Image: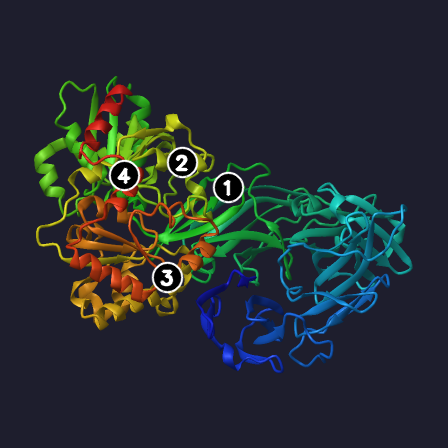
């Protein structure tokens, strides 16, 4: 199956049906494939969007195509070799065909399909997905019996529907047909001006009786002159004459003092935007004030409207209180804070435009500082932050109110920062230990810290940062006194500004919070060298999936000095992310040293891994429509059928656990929100791609990889996981029945793990002596961190 729209989330894909959801509409569409015939298309629902093909699936000798036409979601079936007798209906995309040669002919042969035939009428191939943004080039070898030395490439024809254009080109040298798609949209234009694509690279502009052609791929961001001043004399009072989009890139046709130019994707240069403004919250409004000028020909004062996010309406107009020419460039936007709350989104960029449309992102300076917090205000139980993003554009960010944003804690932070500047730094190194958001102490960080506290003659000072709300805060405080530092205390902030190293199983930001927009302390945290102790062995989910890119060495925002690994096999995953051998320390995970099963352990744990692509559904309260939920329910039903439900323990990913717990009230008694505790109780551990299986195996649990949805997960990850059929250290089950058979087998053999599985496990985790913490301590000493 090929999915063309990122909002399509496949829920089920089987021989009999396809279920999917369109995220923006939060609607599930169910297709019974037995009802879809070649003779008649089937409308399965509505969706407000432009015409487009959503997905294609090969099915026996046919293709199943789901598409949108006039806001109807339609499914059609077409034979691999379609009939030539097709007659378009109201559910069809009525395509237009232009033939530039008699070498080929084109015919519409399906609702979304056209086919190609050679000069003798023989069928060659079909294309079903012209109405998509997929830019894949089709290459079809065929000898059309044309020979010449005058040219190599011949454009044979053009097929068009709406803003989708496909050019068919014949390569005389290679004897092959290629197709090139161009998605071409005219956003705005003056009355007499026309834009047209004459080949995949050439744009033709016609104005009255004048026309000019240009290779749009060679149009620069500085602009290319196409017409003289006299040719557009009638429209010299305008700035932008037309806006087009070609394959996602914008082009502007605009007046300049010496003619009419076409410029590629540079609206700030096109408009001569030259800002010098500031942003500040005051009361219930955000004020953006200063010089807001567009110096381009006839652009001054044309783009005074402020937009936010995907809101199609402006949220404020630039007020210019002075009439004198020199001072008219100055003024302000007064933006109600409430207007920055758009569709529950966390981040919304701000834009400038005219009353009808956006032109460009808002910048406050010509060359602004990037990733800088400009101001923030507490609004109800949330914090609204105005900041520059990584491109220097202005972004509104809305997050839950955390303690560090209160006036008292902000003062703590700034006083601690000033004291650090005034007081000479002591010679002893300061090492800070912490775990997730400094809210708990039950993983590798606390184990390393406790061992460090037993060491003698250290040349460093070592502190564990922990929230007073943590379950074991009082016990740890009693044991280690001043070395346990309360989160959000003045001393917490002071130590942060003086820290030499961070030692944690989390990334550096968790010393305070996962989202942090107080620049002075955020920048300090980012700069402190981190010894990364890891949560688990990194040999499960693929590290080259898009959601993992932030951890790659060249993308990592933090100063990761070293990372703990458990084997040379795991080191290979770090090499994929750009790390070198000297970035890694082969010690094993400290948390494994005290990883045991409870004597009373008898649970069978199921921990499906995090499916980041379903976050949107879950946060919208649509968890029952996710594949994550459906798989959990299938497992529950199977265990119920086999009378093992009382032993099943569901361990949802921590990002989903609250939603799973609240939406499965009937089964709350078998749901665990604490993976650390669940691992102690589980004699069998089942997962698809969670690295927790390596922890469970180390404790003595029987490991099972449940790969019922393996192909689906790989497709969604857009990468191949490192663990596979050959190296997986566990039994593998591909169906529910195989899973239950494997579970019963493990029970019958008293959870004894086979030698072959143990051998594979030791390739991934080289250490079983429970001395990992000691090896980490030795490294910290050798590297003069302690």
> Disc number at residue 572?
2
Q: Are marks 2 and 3 in contact (CB under 8 Å)?
A: no
* CA neighbours of label 3 inside 10 A, class few (<14), some (14 to 19), many (20+): some
Observer able to see residue 778? yes
Of label 1 and label 2, which has the lower sequence position? 1
> Disc number at residue 758?
none
Q: Residue at x 33, y 37 (%)?
A: 508
> Disc number at residue 762?
4
Alpha carbon separation for disc pair 1 and 2: 30 Å
Alpha carbon separation for disc pair 1 and 3: 40 Å
Give the quadrant of the C terminus. Answer: top left
Q: Circle 4 — which element?
A: helix
* CA neighbours of label 4 inside 10 A, class few (<14), some (14 to 19), many (20+): some
Height in image: 51 above or below 379? Answer: below
* CA neighbours of label 1 inside 10 A, class few (<14), some (14 to 19), many (20+): few
User: Comparing marks 1 and 2, which lies closer to the viewer?
Assistant: 2
Which residue is denoted by mark 1 in the rendering?
390
Alpha carbon separation for disc pair 2 and 3: 27 Å
Q: How is the image coloured?
A: rainbow
Alpha carbon separation for disc pair 3 and 4: 25 Å
User: Comparing marks 4 and 1, which lies closer to the viewer?
Assistant: 4
Of label 2 and label 3, which has the lower sequence position? 2
Q: Position of residue 251 (x, y in %)?
A: 71, 51
The mark total stands at 4
User: Comparing marks 1 and 3, which lies closer to the viewer?
Assistant: 3
Q: Position of residue 21 (x, y in %)?
A: 46, 69
> Disc number at residue 708?
3
């Amino acid at each position: 199956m090929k999915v063309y729209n990122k909002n399509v989330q496949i829920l089920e894909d089987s021989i009999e049906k396809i279920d999917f959801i369109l995220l923006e509409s939060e609607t599930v569409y169910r297709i019974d494939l037995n009802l879809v015939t070649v003779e008649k298309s089937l409308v399965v629902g509505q969706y407000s969007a432009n015409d487009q093909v959503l997905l294609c699936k090969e099915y026996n000798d046919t293709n199943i195509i789901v598409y949108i036409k006039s806001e109807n979601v339609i499914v059609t079936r077409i034979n691999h070799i379609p009939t030539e007798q097709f007659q378009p209906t109201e559910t069809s995309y009525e395509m237009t065909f232009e033939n530039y040669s008699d070498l080929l002919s084109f015919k519409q042969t399906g609702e979304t399909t056209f086919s190609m035939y050679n000069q003798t009428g023989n069928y060659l191939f079909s294309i079903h997905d012209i109405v998509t943004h997929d830019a894949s080039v089709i290459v079809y070898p065929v000898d059309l019996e044309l020979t010449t030395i005058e040219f190599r490439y011949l454009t044979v024809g053009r097929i068009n529907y709406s803003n989708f254009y496909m050019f068919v080109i014949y390569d005389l040298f290679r004897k092959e047909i290629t197709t090139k798609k161009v998605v071409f949209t005219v956003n705005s234009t003056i009355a007499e001006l026309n834009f047209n694509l004459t080949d995949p690279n050439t744009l033709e502009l016609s104005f009255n009786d004048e026309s000019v052609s240009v290779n749009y791929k060679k149009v620069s961001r500085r602009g290319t002159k196409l017409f003289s001043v006299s040719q557009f004399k009638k429209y010299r009072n305008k700035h932008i004459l037309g806006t087009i989009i070609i394959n996602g890139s914008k082009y502007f046709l605009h007046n300049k003092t010496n003619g009419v130019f076409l410029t590629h994707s540079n609206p700030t240069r096109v408009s001569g935007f030259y800002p010098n403004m500031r942003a500040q919250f005051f009361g219930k409004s955000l004020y953006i004030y200063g010089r807001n000028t567009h110096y381009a020909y006839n652009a001054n004062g044309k783009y005074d409207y402020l937009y936010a996010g995907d809101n199609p309406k402006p949220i404020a107009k630039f007020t210019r209180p002075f009439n004198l020419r020199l001072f008219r460039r100055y003024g302000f936007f007064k933006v109600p804070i409430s207007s920055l709350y758009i569709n529950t989104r966390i981040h919304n960029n701000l834009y400038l435009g005219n009353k009808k449309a956006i032109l460009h992102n808002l910048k406050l300076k010509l060359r602004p500082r990037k990733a800088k917090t400009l101001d923030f205000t507490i609004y109800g139980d949330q914090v609204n932050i105005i900041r520059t993003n990584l491109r220097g554009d202005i972004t509104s960010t809305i997050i839950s109110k955390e303690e560090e944003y209160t006036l008292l804690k902000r003062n703590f932070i700034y006083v601690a920062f000033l004291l650090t500047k005034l007081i000479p730094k002591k010679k002893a190194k300061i090492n800070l230990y912490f775990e997730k958001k400094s809210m708990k102490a039950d993983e590798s960080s606390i184990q390393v810290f406790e061992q460090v506290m037993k060491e003698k003659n250290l040349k460093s000072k070592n502190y564990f940062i922990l929230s007073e709300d943590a379950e074991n805060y009082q016990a740890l405080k009693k044991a280690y006194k001043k070395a346990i530092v309360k989160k959000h205390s003045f001393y917490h902030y002071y130590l942060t500004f003086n820290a030499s190293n961070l030692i944690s199983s989390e990334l550096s930001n968790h010393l305070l919070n996962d989202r942090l927009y107080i620049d002075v302390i955020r920048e300090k945290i980012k700069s402190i060298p981190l010894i990364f102790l890891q949560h688990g062995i990194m040999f499960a989910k693929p590290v080259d999936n898009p959601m993992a890119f932030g951890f790659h060495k060249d993308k990592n925002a933090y100063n990761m000095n070293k990372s703990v690994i458990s084997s040379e096999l795991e080191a290979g995953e770090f090499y994929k992310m750009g790390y070198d051998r000297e970035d890694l320390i082969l010690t094993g995970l400290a948390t494994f040293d005290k990883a045991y099963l409870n004597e009373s352990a008898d649970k069978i744990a199921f921990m499906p891994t995090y499916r980041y692509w379903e976050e949107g559904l879950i946060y919208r309260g649509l968890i029952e429509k996710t594949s994550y939920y459906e798989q959990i329910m299938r497992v529950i039903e199977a265990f119920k059928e086999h009378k093992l439900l009382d032993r099943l323990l569901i361990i949802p990913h921590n990002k989903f656990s609250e939603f799973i717990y609240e939406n499965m009230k009937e089964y709350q008694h078998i749901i665990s929100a604490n993976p650390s505790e669940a691992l102690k109780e589980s004699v069998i551990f089942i997962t698809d791609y969670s690295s927790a299986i390596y922890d469970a195996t180390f404790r003595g649990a029987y490991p099972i990889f449940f790969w019922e949805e393996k192909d689906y997960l790989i497709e969604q990850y857009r990468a191949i996981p490192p663990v596979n059929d050959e190296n997986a250290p566990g039994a593998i089950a591909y169906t529910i029945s195989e899973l239950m058979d494997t579970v019963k087998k493990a029970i019958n053999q008293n959870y004894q793990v086979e030698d072959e599985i143990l051998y594979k496990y030791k390739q991934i985790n080289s250490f079983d002596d429970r001395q990992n913490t000691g090896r980490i301590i030795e490294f910290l000493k050798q590297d003069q961190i302690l």
